[in-house]
Image (spheres, helix red, strand yellow):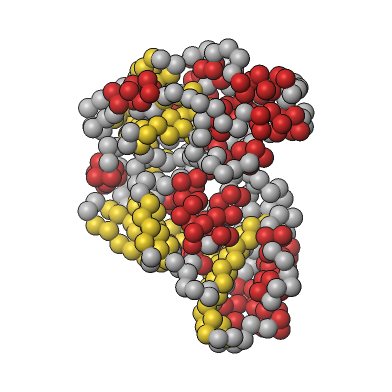
Amino acid sequence: MPDKLRFYLDGEIVTLSGIDPTQSVLDWLRYAARRTGSKEGCAEGDCGACTVLVGELEGERLNWRAVNACILFLPMLDGKALMTVESLKGAHPVQSAMVDLHGSQCGFCTPGIVMSLVGRSMGACGTAGADAAEVLAGNLCRCTGYGPILKAAEQVASLPFDDAHIREALRELRRDTLLVLSYEDPLAGLTRRAYVPRDTDDLSEILIENPDMRLIAGATDVGLWVSKQHRVLPQVAFVGHLMRDIEVTPQGVRLGAGVRYSEARAALAALSSDLGELIRRIGAVQVRNAGTIGGNIANGSPIGDMPPALIALGAELTLRRGEARRTLPLEAYFLDYGKQDRQPGEFVESAFVPTPKAGDVVRIVKLSKRFDSDISAVCAAVHLRFDGAVVQAARLAFGGMAGTPKRAGHAEAVLTGHPLTPERMAMAAEALRSDFTPLSDVRGSSDYRLTVAGNILKKLWLEIQGQGGDVQGVAHG
């Protein structure tokens, strides 16, 4: 079986073997390839100074994504094209605009900003319909020179780009066999292995044999285990190229576990505009271009943004082990902090999100200190179904309020079977204190979380009555 990683970079096929499977693309660029234009500012996918473009063939189309090289592992480039700031060769129109409009001050962040804007000019994933501020939300300028940067962005919003030669090269890199990379780790004193499965059948076989193997899709979480915690992962499988299907039917949307946020946004926004806005609030373009729906669910984080929203909508999860599959309600997957209903050798394959019925009220609110690229203090999702003026069914789900994403059963019971009145909503807000005992941490105290969660419900009543404006107005605070 193949044991060499191959990817395209500036007219050449790069072939690597014997590499550390969790070496970041940024470290390889700076220390092995001597391409020092990409910078390390945070090592956690937040500042964007390391932004590069990754291109992959999907059918006959070459789709480009701006991603953070600091939390992108080298094997994730297999069969793809890489573009760095050095690839631009000479004064690219984006670079010229940055110079002419004084968009660069100290210059440390400039290469990442340039690559984000080059991606936008090429129509890269996650940039369609996005304004310059959204495209650059993942690029921090600590000199705060955002005015000139935004002017430069508008000057070069779209540029022609011929990638025919890259598409031809990537056709030659397509694999039809399992890739296994081995690395003799002198510090850990063990042989570490990385697998790049050909398909989900490969993945299923590998996991049955190695149930403790770590699956990596976008590495937006696992990348920090390595860059910040310096964890050693003996066996990993890179699965970001698998389970990428999106199936839209009148009944709902089925998302493969490997579907990235930026790819899922349009389909989910069609179910609920608030759900589309929530995805807009998850990370920034670079994070949404890497992180996956399945990854956000599978890691079981109590502050993950997608699970509360999907739970409120009644989503179901499909898991696979070998040839066997089972389906369960998403809320049943989360058992306790750090514990999920997943058997050894089993993996999340897809999630199905039902279409809300006409007349349903769906509201999703993310509360965080920053609007962009921030972790929630509280994420609330409310789904109400009415029979006339009476609440027929209520699904209220919250993140950041317990050890897992969780429904508010007491508050749901208060609302169900009654007209929606301000008094009833106030009772539901008070019932949240029976549903949750939040922790206090740097993002908010327990009392703060309970108070704002209740206030979200009260504001929802005002919004339904047309008195409260947009509930998204409390989306960051």
| Quadrant for the N terminus in the image | top left
Q: Nearer the viewer, residue 44 or 387?
A: 387
Q: Position of residue 380 (x, y in %)?
A: 61, 64
Q: Can the viewer see residue 427?
A: no
| Quadrant for the C terminus in the image | bottom right
Taking the spot 55% from the left edge, 51% from the top edge, the residue there is 279
Taking the spot 75% from the left edge, 29% from the top edge, the residue there is 148
Taking the spot 33% from the left edge, 56% from the top edge, the residue there is 319
Q: Position of residue 360 (x, y in %)?
A: 53, 74
**341 w.r.t. 146: above or below:** below
Number of labelled discs? 0
- Using residue 2 as the reference point, say whether residue 286 is left or right of it: right
Q: Nearer the viewer, residue 237 or 186?
A: 237
Q: Nearer the viewer, residue 216 or 162?
A: 162
**362 w.r.t. 75: above or below:** below
Q: Can the viewer see residue 100?
A: yes
**396 w.r.t. 197: above or below:** below
- Using residue 54 as the reference point, say whether residue 447 is left or right of it: right
- Using residue 438 as the reference point, say whether residue 355 is left or right of it: left
Q: Position of residue 424 (x, y in %)?
A: 67, 83
